[in-house]
Structures are given as structure tokens and as C-alpha cells.
Amino acid sequence: MSFTSNELIQFISSYFWPFVRITTLFMVAPFFGTVALIPKKVRLMLSMAVTGVIAPMLPPVAFIDPFSAMGVLVIVQQLLLGLAMGLVMRVAFASLMLSGAVISMPMGLGFANIVDPQNGTQVPVVSSLFTILGTLLFLAINAHLVLIQVLYDSFTSLPIAPIGISKNGLFEVALWGGRMYVGGVLIALPAIIILTLINLTFGVMTRAAPQLNIFAVGFPTTMAAGFLVIFLTLPNLLPKFTTIVYEAFDTIHKIMAGA
């Protein structure tokens, strides 16, 4: 049984194009893209395994020479699509980091930083706590499996071809970027209100009794109140983050569909 060069290129391309999109997503998406949790070699093998499962189920791809200008355009398209999906999920986790940073400041923990395993950067300890909780919830609700399903659906919405994301899809990406700030503020809002009232109370007390050592009293009080507020608001934080995660999946569907 013999194969022509075009048939061989067609067979290899049917796996190579999906592999580019899948690998890009796994390199950027939360949990999959966390170096501290999943090493690069493991991510690469995971991408190959997922490609081996998904590629045979995809519709036939038109013949495109990977070494031609058209092939380069297709590679760029797959990279951008995987990057867009990964960034949408990153924004969902960024809302947790933002809320933690906002809470840390009035608590007096703005100076206490720790290395975030997701990004490898210095973030406030409250942000790191929220990110860890968000990652555990991400796995608990099987969002990592839903992400793979959304990835598979993307090959139907935007098949492998030299076409990119529509203007409406790009607009959805921009709108979703603003969702990070909205989600972060909504998550942190109860703590912000309570800690602001506590700081205002200490400000009034300082004016009424200047001899009061506000640093000796206010700092441990605001920190203790902050931890208490975080403990009390955790039951509401997780459902809110779950909603944000599923909104991220809906946004990916809109981007892929160009709606």
C-alpha cells in the first residue's frame, strides 16, 4: 500500500493543526498552564493525548500545505484561537486575584506577598489563598473537563481553515476583560464595606482621642476583622466564582461562533 506525498501531508496535518490549538490552550489556561502543578513535558504529552482522541472525530480538513503561506496563516489562526480561549479562562481567575488584592490593602496585608503558582509572580497572600481555592473549585466542578469539551466544540464553530475570529468575537474578548474588574469587586465588596467602616471608625476615634495609639490598636483589629470577614464570606465566594467560570465558557462559545 503506497501513499502520495499529498496524502501523507494530509494525514499529518489532520493531527498537526488540532495539536497547535490544543497545545496553545493548555499552555495558557488555568490549572493546565500552571508550571508548579503540571510540568511542560507533562503538558506536551497531555496535548498529544488529547489530540490523538479529538483529531479522528473532526470532519476532514481541506488539503493545506503546512509549508505554504496558507499553512502559516492556519498555524497563526490555531495559535490565536487557543490563546483567546486560554486568556478568557485566565481572566476568570484574575478576578479572584483582584479581589484578594483589594481586600489585602484595608486589612494591612498589602505588603505581605507570596509567589503565585499560577503566574510565578508576587501577589498578596489573600490573592494567593483565593487562587488556590479557585483552582480546587475548578477541579471539583469538573470545569477542566468542560474546558476540553468546549475545546472540541470550537473545532465545529471555527474549523481548521485560514479564517480568524470575527469582529464580534474580538469584541467579546474585550468585554470579557472588563468582567475581571466587575467580578473582582463583587467578590470583595462585603469585605471592602466592613473594613472601610472599621477604618472610618478608627479615624473618628483618633480625632476624638488624639492620645490613642491608633497603630497599636487599629492594625491588629483591622487584620483580625479582615480574616473574620473572609471566613464569613467564603460560602458566597465560591458560588460567585463558579458563576464566573461558566460565564467564561459561554464567552468562549460566543467568540468561536462570532455571536
Image: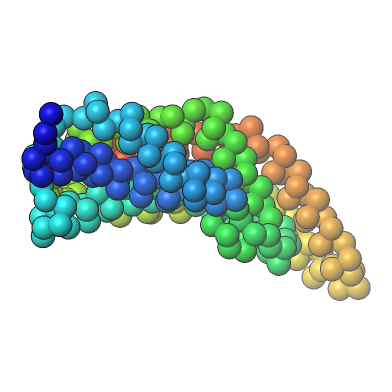
In the image, 254 versus 155, the foreground residue is: 155
Residue 125 location, x and y as percent? 69, 55
Q: Quadrant of residue 145?
A: top left
Quadrant housing the N terminus: top left
From the viewer's perspective, is 174 left or right of 111?
Answer: left
Identify which residue, 53 or 214, lies in the foreground: 53
List the single residue furthest toward the front.
Answer: 1
Does residue 96 sit above or below 2 in this rendering? below
Question: Would you say 116 lies left or right of 30 here?
Answer: right
Asked whether residue 196 appears in the rendered view, the answer is no
Judge whether 219 appears above or below 63 on screen.
below
**Residue 68: x and y, percent?**
11, 58
Q: Nearer the viewer, residue 176 or 196?
A: 176
Please report the residue visible at 23 percent of the width from the left and 44 percent of the height from the top: 17
**Viewed as shown, does residue 60 lie left or right of 120?**
left
Residue 114, position as x, y percentages in the image: 68, 60
Instruction: Specify the quadrant that holds the C terminus.
Output: top left
User: Which residue: 33% across, 36% down?
Assistant: 51
